[in-house]
Image: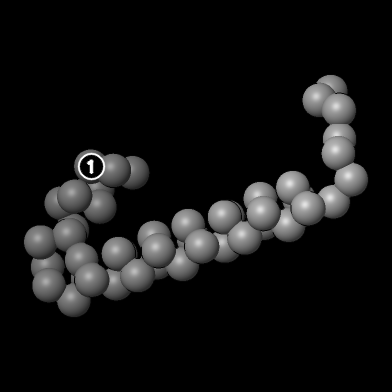
């Protein structure tokens, strides 16, 4: 996956779009983890 995106990232608007998609996914995953940590503590399975 990383090699494919590296090959495509040199195209100006496509590289920008890939960065935006990555940023959105990082924000979503960080928000989900933050919400889980605010709940009751869970013991690892």
Q: Residue 3: where, in percent of width, then height?
A: 23, 42
Q: Nearer the viewer, residue 14 or 30?
A: 30
Q: Nearer the viewer, residue 40 or 4?
A: 40
Left or right, 37 with respect to 21, comes to right
Q: Nearer the viewer, residue 18 or 37?
A: 37
Q: Which residue sits furthest right?
A: 40
Quadrant assignment for the C terminus: top right
Left or right, 32 with respect to 13, comes to right
- Look at the picture and state if 23 lies above or below 39: below
Which of the 4 image quarters holds residue 17? Answer: bottom left
Residue name at image x 86 percent, y 35 percent: 42
Quadrant assignment for the N terminus: top left
Which of the 4 image quarters holds residue 16? Answer: bottom left
**Residue at disc 1, secondary structure:** helix
Residue name at image x 18 percent, y 58 percent: 8
Q: Which residue sits furthest bottom?
A: 13
Residue under circle 1? 3
Residue name at image x 19 percent, y 50 percent: 6
- Look at the picture and state if 27 lies above or below 5: below
Q: Residue 20: where, in percent of width, then height?
A: 35, 70
Left or right, 29 with respect to 35, comes to left
Q: Residue 23: where, in percent of width, then height?
A: 40, 63
Q: Please count the marks in the image.
A: 1
Q: Nearer the viewer, residue 18 or 32?
A: 32
């Amino acid at each position: 996956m990383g090699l494919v995106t590296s090959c495509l990232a040199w195209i100006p608007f496509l590289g920008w779009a890939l960065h935006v998609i990555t940023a959105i996914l990082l924000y979503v995953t960080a928000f989900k983890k933050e919400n889980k940590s605010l709940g009751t503590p869970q013991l690892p399975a």
